[in-house]
Image: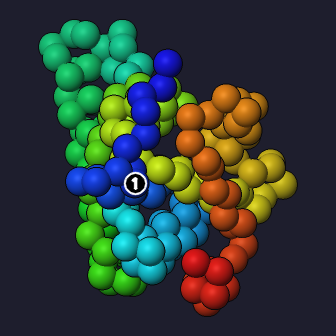
Amino acid sequence: MTRKRTSYQSGHAPKFLVVVDDSPECDRAIVFAARRASRTGHGLQMLAVVDPQLGDGQGLFGVAEVMRAEAHAEARAKLDAAADRAMKLVGVEPELVVRDGAMAEAILAQIEEDPDVAILILAAGTGKDGPGPLVSSLARSAGTFPIPVALVPGQLTDEEIEALA
């Protein structure tokens, strides 16, 4: 059961959620979400997900813990860079979140935990492999997703996004 959305209730503010990862199209989602947040007065939340399997089987001498700590530091660095991009672009300061888990489950957990998240913004890849694994995965369950998902075409330029957002 999904928690009731409170985004537009008194004392709450709607947020756009963007997943920050290594995909080439990720920047398109960041630019679109930052511009929309700036124009609408919504909040911006950026999520990085760390694979919980990282370091499994490496229990000797604390190697697994070191690998997880490094993965969290790397995720935080990606979020910091994405936040810097949003700040420089439109002056929006996002909320940064790092979660452990499989990507789709971590996204759903974040949406469940924060009832002010109103829209998930993703960008579709432009390569021959299709829209990307995250978009493909979420597309399979789109009919049951708890909030709207906005897909930004990955080939859009900053200027084109500016005109649309």
- Asked if residue 81 can be seen in this view, the reply is no
Along the viewing direction, whichever of 72 and 3 lies nearer the viewer = 3
Q: Residue at x 84, y 54 (%)?
A: 128
Along the viewing direction, whichever of 65 and 125 lies nearer the viewer = 125
* 1 to the left or right of 57: right
- Residue 63 x/y as whole percent: 22, 21
Along the viewing direction, whichever of 103 and 38 lies nearer the viewer = 38
How many tags in the picture? 1
Q: Residue at x 41, y 19 (%)?
A: 53
Identify the amino acid type marked 1: Tyr
Q: Residue at x 40, y 78 (%)?
A: 38
- Residue 25 x/y as whole percent: 61, 62
Q: Is residue 87 above or below residue 102?
A: below
- Asked if residue 33 can be seen in this view, the reply is yes
Q: Residue at x 34, y 21 (%)?
A: 55
Callout 1: SS: loop
* 114 to the left or right of 18: left
How many C-alpha atoms fall within 10 Å of the one at disc 1: few (<14), some, or many (≥20)?
Answer: few
Residue 124 occupies which quadrant of the picture?
bottom right
Q: Is residue 94 above or below residue 130?
A: below
Q: Which residue is mark 1?
A: 8
* 7 to the left or right of 150: left
